[in-house]
């Protein structure tokens, strides 16, 4: 008879060993570390700097006509603004090229002066210029102000970076889950390691859990680095509860992990999994409001966009980080994430193949 | 250490496997085997013969299209967890993680088994102590193969499945692998090995099945196969100068056939080299001519295969 099996220490049990080897394997691949940790930061920095609010820099406003009731004919002076006078055609051209942030046009009709804004909805400075001008005009007691609602970017005291960081977190969780799990599994399958594991007493559960856990550890690192840096550099904050934030991150991470598992449940080639992955991710990159608000898409798309997992994740992250809302007010988003997780996980377990 | 019972290590009946596709590939077409405990059983056959498929059916990694497999008296459907604990497998091709060291890899595999060997002992068994902290990616092919073998051994299996464990290795590494297999067998283990090297099969295996196009075409011990299908030993005699009497040696009981290849070269066939060689020498001396060389050729499993199929063992199976 074989001797009775010795009780193994927990470090020599399958799950800790699998997690451990996945982690050290990862740290021994410098390129992987770069892509996982520095790329998102690079993105945050470049976008954050490109779109950062420039508190010391003045907003450039073109005046058309004589909107600020200044009889001297010279541009008025107001702190925070640099005004210039142009004809409407020239001004529109400048606005298009991003050389000015907004245009304030006045039309004298029957001695009554009407004001009109021209803004560029794709640039946050533009909305900011309009908002600030409005306050400025209110202070100057301009009587007949009828601003035309042209502002699409709902900044509401929010800077672009505050809007951007939750979106970046969202795509990192998505990419991490899909690539981390999908690619890892297909890689194991291509290398016949999955089959080799199947020839041992190791259980599928341990394998999948180990991939999930190691993924969570990487992702936690990513989230901490991204959040910490954007807090230090840009002062981005989580206004809502930290616990709520963590729950949403875990929920979102788990959701994309399950989708990754489904994507890779059968694929036997890198090309296949690449293709499916892009097919899954691209629509969400575009529609789920990563770099700009999803509200800019046509109304009829809204119901579809709302049930995409990345939309649910981004919206929840923004609600918690920027609006300080609690998770209890995010029932719909949590439900969307939960349903995607349950559905894809169940399907993935049914379809999963070792070879 | 091993349970001595009369039952077989592996028994399979009429195994078939057809890979779906257009057209479907009938990789295994009715294989029945009976492998005794403590035996080293070899499956010999050319590329594409169905060796790997047959092995994976027995390893429970593939589901047979029809037929039954019993391993250590149990079936994969019912007792797979127990069987996984008792079997060690080395696949024909596995790319172990390049970024892990030998020790980390063996530890990982050890963790899967309830009753695993000490990873360091196993590494010593495959003579890789000096490499135990090297990354797998930095090992030579032969060393990687030995790591794969160590992974198969670390769960203290009773039964080893080895799919071409020495393909692509140099003679030195092959001998090391053979030694490990023999050590495992000496401790009572059972081995099922596939190969297309005859010398390997002759050296290691007590019993062999020669597989071609998904079927067993001959089965038995190497000696039996050689005797039954190998043909006779040949003796080739070259004289320095031409012209001995073509009848210089008369066929007798052992020498069954003689032919004159050229005036100074003769080819004999014999059933017993030991008995006929002195007689050949004596007869040759009587001719008064000087012998330049005598070459003998004993049948090998290669000859068995050629004799059975008319093809060489390393030829690809074409259009089956
Ligand atoms: N997954 C698969 N799908 C379809 N056909 C397959 C598959 N695996 C193997 N085959 C086919 O089955 C036949 C037997 O293959 P197998 O790998 O069992 O041969 P083998 O004897 O191990 O060959 P080798 O000596 O080259 O390893 C071959 O014709 C092969 O092309
Ligand atoms: Mg093979």
Image (spheres, coloured by chain):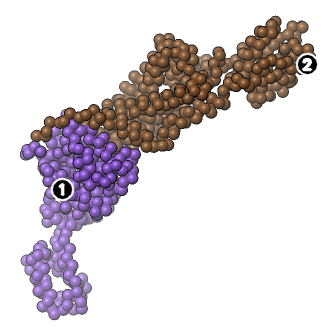
Chain colours: A brown, B purple
Q: Where does the C terminus of chain A fall, quadrant-wise?
A: top left
Residue A20 showing in the rendered view: yes
The reply, left or right, for residue B222 in relation to residue A268 is: left
Residue A160, quarter of the rendered image:
top right
At 29% across and 45% down in the image, what residue appears? B106
Determine which of the numbered discs, if any, sits on residue B182 in the image.
Answer: 1
The residue depicted at 21 percent of the width and 92 percent of the height is B243
Number of numbered markers:
2
Q: Considering depth in this image, is B88 or A75 the residue closer to the camera? A: A75
Residue projecting furthest to the right:
A72
Residue in view at x 64 percent, y 21 percent? A159
Q: Name the foreground residue: B248 vs A321.
A: A321
Chain containing mark 2: A
Q: Secondary structure at mark 1?
A: helix
Q: Chain of mark 1?
A: B
The residue lying toward the viewer, choosing from B301 and A39, is A39
Image x and y of residue B128, in percent: 29, 53
- Up/down of B194 relative to A269, above or below: below
> Badge 2 is on which residue?
A73
> For this rendering, which residue is in front, B204 or A127?
A127
Residue at left offset 18%, top offset 88%? B246
């Amino acid at each position: 008879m074989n001797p009775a099996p010795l009780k193994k220490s927990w470090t020599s049990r399958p799950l800790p060993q699998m997690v451990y080897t996945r982690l050290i394997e990862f740290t021994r691949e410098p390129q992987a570390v770069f892509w996982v940790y520095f790329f998102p930061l690079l993105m945050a920095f470049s976008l954050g700097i490109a779109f950062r609010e420039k508190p010391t820099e003045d907003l450039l406003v073109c005046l058309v006509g004589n909107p600020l009731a200044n009889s001297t004919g010279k541009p008025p002076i107001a702190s925070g603004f640099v005004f210039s006078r142009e004809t409407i055609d020239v001004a529109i051209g400048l606005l298009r090229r991003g050389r000015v942030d907004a245009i304030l046009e006045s039309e004298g009709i029957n001695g009554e002066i009407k004001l009109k804004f021209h803004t560029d909805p794709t640039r946050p400075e533009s909305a900011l210029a309009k908002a600030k001008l409005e306050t400025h005009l209110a202070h100057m007691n301009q009587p007949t102000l009828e601003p035309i609602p042209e502002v699409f970017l709902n900044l509401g005291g929010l800077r672009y970076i505050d809007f951007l960081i939750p979106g970046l977190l969202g795509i990192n969780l998505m990419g991490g889950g899909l690539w981390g799990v999908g690619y890892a599994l297909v890689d194991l399958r291509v290398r016949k390691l999955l089959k080799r594991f199947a020839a041992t007493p190791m259980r599928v559960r341990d394998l999948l859990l180990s991939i999930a856990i190691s993924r969570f550890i990487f992702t936690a690192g990513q989230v901490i680095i991204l959040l910490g840096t954007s807090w230090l550099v840009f002062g981005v904050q989580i206004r809502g509860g930290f616990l709520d934030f963590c729950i949403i991150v875990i929920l979102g991470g788990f959701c994309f992990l399950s989708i990754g598992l489904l994507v890779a449940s059968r694929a036997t080639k890198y090309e296949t999994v690449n293709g499916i992955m892009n097919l899954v991710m691209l629509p969400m990159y575009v529609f789920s409001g990563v770099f700009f608000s999803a509200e800019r898409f046509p109304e009829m798309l809204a119901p579809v966009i709302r049930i995409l997992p990345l939309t649910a994740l981004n919206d929840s992250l923004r609600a918690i980080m920027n609006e300080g809302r609690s998770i209890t007010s995010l029932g719909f988003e949590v439900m969307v994430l939960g349903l995607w997780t349950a559905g894809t996980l169940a399907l993935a377990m049914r379809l999963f193949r070792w070879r | 250490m091993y349970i001595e019972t009369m039952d077989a290590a592996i028994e399979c009946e009429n195994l078939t496997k057809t890979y779906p596709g257009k057209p479907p590939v009938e990789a295994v077409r009715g294989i029945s085997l009976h492998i005794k405990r403590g035996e080293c059983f070899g499956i010999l056959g050319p590329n594409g013969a169905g060796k790997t498929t047959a092995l994976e059916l027995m390893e429970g990694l593939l589901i047979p299209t029809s037929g039954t497999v019993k391993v250590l008296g149990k079936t994969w459907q019912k007792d797979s967890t127990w069987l996984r604990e008792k079997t060690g497998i080395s696949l024909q091709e596995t790319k172990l993680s390049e970024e892990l060291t030998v020790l980390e890899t063996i530890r990982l595999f050890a963790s899967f088994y309830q009753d695993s060997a000490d990873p360091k002992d196993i590494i010593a068994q495959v003579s890789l102590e000096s490499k135990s902290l090297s990354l797998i990616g930095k090992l030579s092919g032969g060393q990687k193969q030995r790591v794969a073998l160590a992974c198969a051994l670390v769960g203290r299996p009773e039964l080893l499945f080895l799919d071409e464990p020495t393909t692509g290795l140099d003679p030195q590494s092959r001998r090391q692998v053979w030694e490990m297999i023999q050590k495992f067998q000496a401790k009572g283990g059972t081995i099922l090995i596939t190969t297309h090297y005859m010398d390997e099969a002759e050296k290691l295996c007590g019993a062999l099945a020669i597989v071609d196009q998904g079927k067993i075409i001959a089965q038995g011990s190497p000696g039996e196969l050689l005797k039954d299908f190998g043909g006779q030993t040949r003796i080739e005699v070259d004289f320095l100068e031409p012209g001995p009497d073509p009848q210089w040696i008369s066929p007798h009981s052992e020498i069954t056939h003689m032919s004159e290849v050229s005036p100074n070269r003769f080819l004999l066939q014999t059933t017993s080299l030991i008995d006929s060689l002195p007689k050949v020498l004596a007869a040759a001396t009587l001719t008064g001519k000087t012998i330049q060389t005598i070459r003998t050729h004993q049948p090998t499993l290669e000859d068995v295969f050629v004799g059975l199929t008319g093809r060489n063992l390393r030829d690809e199976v074409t259009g089956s």
